[in-house]
Structure formats: C-alpha cells, structure tokens
Amino acid sequence: MTDPATVKPTQKQMANAIRVLAMDGVEKAKSGHPGMPMGMADVATVLFSKFLKFDASRPDWADRDRFILSAGHGSMLIYALLHLTGYKAATRQELSNFRQWGSKTAGHPEYGHMPGVEVTTGPLGQGLATSVGFAMAERHLAAKYGEDLVDHRTWVVAGDGCLMEGVSQEAIALAGRYKLNKLTVLWDDNEITIDGKVSLSDTTDQKARFKAAGWAVKAVDGHDVDAIKAALKWATKQDKPTLLACKTRIGKGAATMEGSHKTHGAALGAAEVAATRLGLGWDHDPFELPENIQKAWLKVGRQGAKHRKAWEARLVASKQAADFTRAMKGDLPETAFAKLDAKIAELIETRPAQATRQSSGAALDEVFAAIPELIGGSADLTGSNNTFVKDTPIFDAPTYEGRYVNWGIREFGMAAALNGLALHGGIIPYGGTFMVFSDYSRPAIRLGALMGVRAIHVLTHDSIGLGEDGPTHQPVEHLAALRAIPNLYVFRPADTVEAMEAWKIALEARTTPSAMCLSRQKTQAVRTVASAENLTAKGAYEIKAANGEARVTLFGTGTELALALKAAETLEAEGTPTRVVSVPCFELFEKQDAAYQASVLGRGTVRVAVEAAIQQGWERFIGEDGGFVGMSSFGASAPAEVLYEKFGITSDAVVAAVKARL
Amino acid sequence: MTDPATVKPTQKQMANAIRVLAMDGVEKAKSGHPGMPMGMADVATVLFSKFLKFDASRPDWADRDRFILSAGHGSMLIYALLHLTGYKAATRQELSNFRQWGSKTAGHPEYGHMPGVEVTTGPLGQGLATSVGFAMAERHLAAKYGEDLVDHRTWVVAGDGCLMEGVSQEAIALAGRYKLNKLTVLWDDNEITIDGKVSLSDTTDQKARFKAAGWAVKAVDGHDVDAIKAALKWATKQDKPTLLACKTRIGKGAATMEGSHKTHGAALGAAEVAATRLGLGWDHDPFELPENIQKAWLKVGRQGAKHRKAWEARLVASKQAADFTRAMKGDLPETAFAKLDAKIAELIETRPAQATRQSSGAALDEVFAAIPELIGGSADLTGSNNTFVKDTPIFDAPTYEGRYVNWGIREFGMAAALNGLALHGGIIPYGGTFMVFSDYSRPAIRLGALMGVRAIHVLTHDSIGLGEDGPTHQPVEHLAALRAIPNLYVFRPADTVEAMEAWKIALEARTTPSAMCLSRQKTQAVRTVASAENLTAKGAYEIKAANGEARVTLFGTGTELALALKAAETLEAEGTPTRVVSVPCFELFEKQDAAYQASVLGRGTVRVAVEAAIQQGWERFIGEDGGFVGMSSFGASAPAEVLYEKFGITSDAVVAAVKARL
C-alpha cells in the first residue's frame, strides 16, 4: 500500500485545503466570508502553484509578483494561501485567531499586519484601483533599472462588488490607456452579491466593458484546473492588461449552500461544515492538514527560491544595485534637499509674493532632479496644480521611464494608484487636483493613512480664494474633514518657505501620507527670518512675537496668515501687544510636547483664529471663548477678493474679534 | 427688400446666438469656459427648438422635460438658452453679470439661483449621476399617476470629464439595469480636456462601454443640424437609455482657436472675440441680439405652452390631482406621523434594547405606508441597513411603481440619484450603506447639502461597534467629517425613540439632507420619560438631571450615551451630582437660542463627552479643559465588546475622566 503522506495530491485536493481552512476560520470566529475563498480556491491554487512568482521565505523580495485580494472580505483566501505555502507569520494559531484582537488575521487583509498582504483591502474597488499603481510602478522601474531587476506581474482577485464601484472604471481605463500588460484581474464571476443575485442590481456586460477600456478578456470555468492553467498562460502573453472572467460557484464545495448568497458573509454553521467535510472527503480536525497536501503546498512556497536567488545574484552584479536598494528601502538620496535648502535660505531674502500652489511647484522644481523616485501628475489640472516640472518626460506606453503622469479626470483612481505606487516601493508618488475634489479621492486618502504610505496629495484652490467657479469648487469644510483622518499630514502653508518645508516633511514621511492645501491666489511672504529649524515641522509656531507681554494671540494658516499679521500690526499700533502663530499642520502640532504646545497656545491672552474655512477643530487653539474669523456656510461665485470681503474674512474682522474680547 | 427682422433664421444662426452670448459672458467676466457652449450650440439649438418639452413662462411645470448640464463648467450654454427662450429671470443684466457676487449666473449652474437650472452641476460626473434619479422619478411617478400626468424625458449634456469620473459607471449601469429609456445623454465628444487631447489620458471606447451597460448608442455629427434632428428623434424611440456621441469641435466658430483646449477654461480675449464676430457675420454689441433671431428663440420658449395648458387641464380632471400636487410640492400627507407618534409613546413604556439600525428600520415600518412618496433602498446591504419594509414591491423595469430600490454596490451613484429623485419632486428618497462608505458617497452628500434637498442617507455600523470587519469598515473620523458639511443634519440617535424622532425631522426637512448614523450593536433604551416635544429636534438636551446642584455634565451620543448614563449613576452613588446630555444632532443644537445652549452646556461643571469617534468638534461642548472618551486612531478587527474595552471607551473611563478633573 502507498503511504498516503507521499501521494502527490491533485490541484483539486490542494484547493480543498483552502476551502476547509476558510470555512473553519470563519466558523471559529463566527464571523467572516467563506463563500469567496471556497469559490476561488481552484483559481488561486493554479495561480499560486503554477504562475505566481514568490518565495514564501522572503515576502519582501523586490521582484516578486504581487497578489492583491481586492475582494478583501474573502480574507481567509489569502490567509489560507500564506499559511499553506509556509509564510512564517501565517501560523495555524493565527488562522484560528481570525478576526480577534491582536491577531495578524484581521477581518480584511491589512497591510503591515501579515507579510504577504500587499495592500489593505475591503473597501470595494480599491484593491483593483491600487493594483494599477503597482503595475505602473513595475513598468516604470523596469524601464529604469532593466528587466533583469524588475520583471514581475500583478494579479488581482476582484468580485462583482469591485466591478460595480465606480472607481473600477477609473482604474481599468488607466490600465488600458497605459497598456499595463502585466496586470491581470481574476474576476470571481459568481453572480452573487450580499443581497442575492447580481442581476438584482446589475446587468452590465463586464467583459465588453473591459474590452472597451482596452483590456484583453477571456472567460474561464473557475473550477476547471486545466482551463484555468491555459487562461493564466494566455494572460501572460498579452500586450494589454487582462481580465479573466472566472465563472465560479460561491461557497463551492459547501454541502447544501454552494451557490447561495448565504455563504457570502456568515459562518456556514456546524452542521453545514460537518456535511461539507464529508462531501469533500476531508477527515481532519479544524486547521489540521493531511501530510501530503501540506507538503505539496510547502513545496509551492519554496519553488520561487531559485528565481529569487538568481535575481539576488543579478542585483549584486548590477551597477544600479545601490540605487535600486536605496529606493526600494524608501531612503532618500543623500543630496535630496541640497538645492531645496539653499532655495529656502534665498527665499527668506527675496520674499516672493506668489500663490502657494506656485510655491509648491517651486518646491518640486528644487527636488525633482535630486529625488529620481519622485513621480507625479495631475487629474487634468496640470497648469492649475503646478505639478509639472519643466522638461519632465511623460509616463506613457512604451516610454514608462517618464515621470509625469496624465491621470485623467479620475481623482479617486489617481489617489488609489498613488497608494499602489508607494506600496510597491521604489517610488514616491504625488497627484494633483482641486482641493474640493479631495471628496472624490477621500476613500483612497483614508486607506493610505490607514496603511501608512508616503503618498502626496497636491490639493490646490484651497478656499473661497478659488473665486468665480463658485461653491461647487470651493472647499469650506475640507480642511476640517481632512484633519479628521488619523495619520494624515494636512499642510496649509502660508508662503513659499512653509510650502517648501512642508514638501520636505512629506517627502521624509515614510509612513504618513500628506495633503498639501494650496492657494489659487497670491499671498505675501511671511517667513522673513532665517531659521535653522524646519518650523513647519512643529505644526504651529510663533511667527511674530508681541511687543511686550502678549495680550493677544492670533492664529492663522495659508493665505489668511497675512490677515493675522496685518491685524497684529494694527493692534500693536494701538498699543496692544499681539503675537501671531502660524499653524501649517495641526497633526504635527499634536506631536509636540505639552510644554511647547502650551507656549504656543498662549492661554490667558485673547485668542482669535482666521482661516477661510469652517471653525470645527479650531477650539483646540482658541478655546471656548476665542474668536474665529472664517466661513460658516458654503461659498459663492464671484472674484476672490469680493468673496473675502463679503464673507468678512479680513484683517479688520480679526481686529474686531479681538476688541470684542479685550 | 425683406425686412431682416422678419427673416426666419436658420438653426445655425440661432446657434450662433448661443456662441456669441457664451463668448461675451466669459469675456466680460474674464473667467469661465466658452469652448463647450460654442461646441454644443448646434446640438442644444436642435434639442431646445425641436424636442425639449418646456414652457419658459413656467419653469416649475411638473411635466416638463428636464435639461441637465452635467458639464457644468459650460454654464453659459444654459444661461444663454434660458435668456434666449425668455425665462424671466435670465435677463441680459444677469448674463452680463456672469460669475459676479449676487448674480443668478454663477460660475457653475446652481439650483435655486436661476429657474430652469434643475441641478447644481460642476463636480464632474455628478450631473449625469443625478439625472438617473430624475429618470427614475419620472418612471415611478408615471407608473403611479399615469402617463397623462407624468410623461417627460431627461436630457443630459455630458463632457469627457463626466465620462472619465468613476461615478459615471455607477450611473450608466443603474440606468441600463432599470431600462430608463427616457434618459438621453448628449456626450460632447470633442476630444479635448483641460490638459489637451483626451487621448493623453484616455482611450476608452465610450460607445462600446455604454452598450455594455445596456444603453442604445449612436454617433452624430454635432454640427449637422439634420443629423442631430434624426439622432434625437431616434433617441426618443428606444427601449433603453440612449447615448448620442456628438462629435463636435470645442469652441466651434472661434476665429483661430476652434478645436483648441485653449477655449476650454478661459476667456478668448478681445482680438479673438472680434475676429469670431467677423467670421460669424455677427454685427452686434455684446449681449445684443438681431431681432429675427431673438423672436425665433422667444417663440421656441413659448411653443410648449399649449402642451402645458393641456396638461393642466388633464390634472384638473384627474382624481389624483390633489395627491399629485401635494407630493410635488413636497408637503407630507396629513397623517404622515400618526402611527409613528403612537409608536414613540408606546416605546417610552416598552423600552426595547435594540441596535439603532433596527430602530431606524422600525421607524420606516411606521411611516412607509403613510408616506407613499418615500422610496428607498440599499447599496447591497439590505439586511444590514434595515432599509427594507416588509412586502414592499421592488422598483424594477417594468414594475416602476415599486418602492424598494436595489442600488447595487454603488454608494456614490446611489447618493447622487437620491439627489435627483428629490430634485425631481414627488419623491422623498433614502439609501443605505455602511457609514464608512459615506466617504464614497460624500461628494453627492455635499452637493445635496449645497442644493438643499431632502435626501436621507441611512448609514449603519457607525463605529468600532461594527466589530470584526476591522478598521477599513469602522468609521472613526466620519462623524466629524459629516458634521463639517454645512446644511447637513447628522443624527446619531441613542435609542429607538431618538431614531424615530430623527426620522421625523429628516422627513420634514424640505431643504436639508440628513445622515442617520446608526449602530450595528444593541444598545439600551435611554428615553424613558414621555415628552410632548421632539427632543432630538433641539440637537442636544438634558436627559438626566443632577441630584442637587450639578458638579458634572456628561455628554454622549448613540450607543455611548448609555455609558454616560452608567457613569452618572456611579458618580451620583458617590455623591457627585451629575447631569447627562444627549447630543443627537450638533447642527440642530446650533440653531437653538443662546440661552438654551448655555443651559445645556453647563459651563462651570466638569464636562466630559463620550463618543466612539475622534474628538474634533466636541470642544464646543466640553471646552478646552473638558474630558473626552473616544478614539484617537483607526480601529481594529475584533468583536465589538473587546474593541470598546481595548480602546478604553467604557463608563469607567468616563468616571475616571471626571475624577481627574473634579
């Protein structure tokens, strides 16, 4: 008799290991989504065992293929795969602790928790949209460093929900436009959503839609191993991004519930689990595996090691090794800020009066050559966002070495792709739009903050100062709304020096995205005294001391800081000692020690803040009785200077708010 | 010789009137977008003169066709059309005051400023997405009241930007699924965006894409009057929504700049304007019209009057006249709240312990039959959002009389369609999703607030109480972010009574959208004393008085109010007189008079607030030295009760925060 431990399992049997682990993990947690992992187990088995380039012992190997579970609710699929292939962190203990406090097996896959999870997914559509950034990064770095060092694919598992979300359109249009042929989407075409059949709410011909976006498309039986193999092979041969419509049965293998939306988002229950085990011929305890299947999967996890080692040898031999390694680690070049620092020193003298969006563009001018991993663009507002550095080649197919991206009118898709570019490594990405459209990109800004990625959002036209375009285009609540997101630096620089300091911080912030809030309209230079320190990094700092013991503290940001300074002049002239505090970044202020914070806040003085936005959040600075000069409604359509006057955001109003409190 | 004033102008000449007005309006403002109105002038002329059912003297005629300028930056197109056809408000003075303070001719068309503007547009894609709501409203009301009363079309002008935005996919998929055949999109296919050619960033085959979404599609030369006529005619005969790809030249007619992206977003300049006049043979001062063209256009504005009068006669004869008129006016039925009020009285006695999402569902149960214009659904989370009232027929093709909508996994598209349903009139719409996905729908929530529409956003799973799904699905900053939006009621009810009161307010709020923030997890009943007043309408109110002179004030919302009440019990037991304030709606509190506000705020007492969200905004209640028990980071994946414990949101923590301050 053959020893069962040595019998080579079939791909189907290997897939059943995923099914059972997924079912058991959810059952133990009494919470989760077994249907998707069970349905996509066959596809995932073929992908991992025959196509995905990876080495389970080195989750951080730079040239690995990226596997992205856009349908993040099916997280047990990836946890099962990582466990089976021998990722050290994906222990049996972790699997049985699915969705519990402190485990690495969060309800949705979370970047930074479990090695092998490339992106935090769950908010539907975003895994797919982020994957476009990965695929762009690969093409760019391949063009830059050669395919000897960079030559890998991005594989995405997406569900019907991902494809219904609008961001999927932005993503697939971008991928199609840029012919990202190393991107493959495996659509779990199971015709089921939470509420029932997909057809309840959607009758889109997805295959035709992807074709219209410039993709190569193929349908495949998602339970036919040979067909899957052939289809994946086909995908690797195309000159376009590829969609495989994998026709599957949700909860495949479940004894009585296979094909039902009941397997989507809840544990199957003990009876169904037992019956499913029986049906699959699976005679093992939860989280326990037959030896031959375990061995076969672990072998899969090791089979990429030889490719990895060959790659390492090529890296060592490469003249670009040092630069490649540095960039992938996320270190900046040593000379990153040489020109910028010199420029800041110069600006303290020359004091240009310009819009902060121009200041931001000027900052880019100073760092763009020095930081070659900086890649950016605009969502069709290049001239307005000041995101283009002269003579930058365009990122395009086939000129992927270009560093300027025409993102199109796709703020959300852009922001998600920025996350992907940053997560891939080797790139520091930025993208521009009008600040009001941060509402469009907000879900990706949030996910970037949650993951802790260095993505830089350039948001110009940051207030009613936008003028004639009117309230649809004037951010009023957006500063507050962005400041509300944890782990996001929201900068509102007051002049060119602050803008440059903000860029420096953003570029150095390895685990925090930044939002640069920048004015359309001109403002005066306010930083006129040289400082050895990056004062913006303090979040808030005294920019003008009082003449004598301060009776008044004025706070301001961006273009309104000039109003505070002018009001201070008036008050001082009338004999009221007044200090002025610039507040370029609330979040960084909160990181300062209590003594510094107290010294800035100036309790006991009359406190008034001015910002062309709503008050929410400013009580932190002005207390309950302070004054606030700003907005309390949406804006209006008129020239900027008229709007400031009509909405009462003037230095006179600041003075009046002070006097009412003196 | 013929008197030129009596010569019937050609459609081309009538279109030139639009071109010149648009060019002149932008020139005068030195700001705006002349290219689109000039490019689409021929299409708009044929549409308005031959197809659009309207009567310029009655912009509010219920059965008019709706014209929606999704490409809102081309606002001079609609202003010119309204002026030419004789809308009273669209005076020459208004045209020459384009984009100025106090004018009705805002930079982007704004609902409520200028009659004839059906929707505020400008944020790209949203006009199109909103139009789906209009078209749904038409089909529903036609099914309900008959086509004698309701039988009109929705026409949308959309640009390349609208089609690149992801929300367009959600919109066209919805329209296709529901076979909204009275919706026609006129795509200004001019191949130009702000940054240059569309092909810079997009190569999507839009016609194939719309077909894939279930639309009938036709291409037409947008400058060939007969072809346009035939195409519009064709559109009215289809059994699906229709896309007309109108091939146009941006800035058509401009002397040297026709076809260039330079006409997109800036004034043409005096020289180009003069040369264009010459080229068009237009020998008139700015805003002045040749008499024959003026007459012809005014006739167009009057030609619908006979249809309108016939319709009015049918209305008068209809048995449904009163109900139709009431619903279109936005008045609620007299008995709207009879059952709900009785239920509230009952609940004060029975005090059910249930999740507030269940409470919200219970509120719907009580009003759904009594308010037949209430139509809603969920973005594929029906069971979770508690949005379905038992036995409600489904809105579908052809059963448009159904009142439950399967929105699909399209939060943004849903929210935009809610705006459209509300703006159309005759309907009060609601839509459900997880609260964290208010980030997806946020741009439409904002636009609804700006327009002042009665749309109700049901946002369940409102905190870490969501549990195992983890931080991607746990709102932490969303309460603050939503409270930041002007003119939005953000309700976070603490129990069933407050949830029902909130629904009552939302249903009565004709010019304010509402966000219902509702818990996944159970909570206890906190309102146990009958009140003649709707206490939720005060925004904040004392729910428990102190025993003796209050030394402490505790504030709470939603599921955390119970923690505040429990903490108060502990404090009172220890001899510390403690009052508790429920804060279901910040915005409504701000509308109370100063004396009431002061009485609630309890200055001089130790103040602590508890809410499972970030602190931003709470300083309004607790001052600078108050305590806050809540979140300061993203959440985590674990069961809800574990998360509350681990993140320290407990009644013990409230007590400790008080004691640290006593």
Image (cartoon, coloured by chain):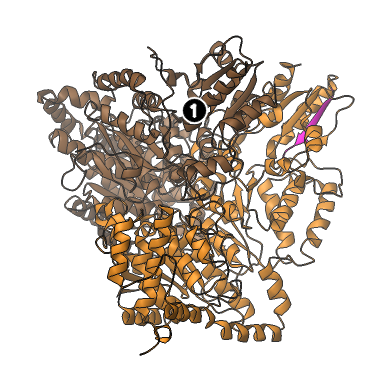
Chain colours: A orange, B brown
Residue A525: image location, x then y, percent: 77, 42
- What's the residue at 84%, 49% (across, down)? A533
Residue at left offset 53%, top offset 38%: B481
User: Was residue A579 drawn as part of the magenta stretch in this picture?
Assistant: yes
State whether residue A636 appears in this view: no
Percent x, y for residue B165?
A: 43, 54
- In the image as oriented, which residue stretches furthest toward the top? B548
Residue drawn at 45 percent across, 61 percent down: A75
- Residue B115 image-quadrant placement: top left
Left or right of residue B300, residue A587 in this image: right
Asked whether residue A280 is in view, the answer is yes
Q: Residue at x 52, y 60 (%)?
A: A407
Span colored in magenta: A577-583
Residue flagged by tag 1: what amino acid is it?
Answer: Ala
Asked if the stretch drawn in magenta spans residue B175, the answer is no
Front residue (pair A441, B62): A441
- Badge 1 density bin: few <14, some 14–19, many ≥20, Cα 10 Å: many
Pick the residue in front: B494 or B525. B525
Occupied quadrant, residue B82: top left
Q: Which is the main secondary structure of the residues drawn in magenta?
A: strand
Frontmost residue, B198 versus B616: B616
**Which quadrant of the rendered structure holds the N terminus of chain A?**
bottom left
Tell me the subunit letter for badge 1.
B
Q: Position of residue B12 (x, y in %)?
A: 31, 49
Residue furthest out toward the bottom: A1
Q: What residue is disc 1 on? A: B562
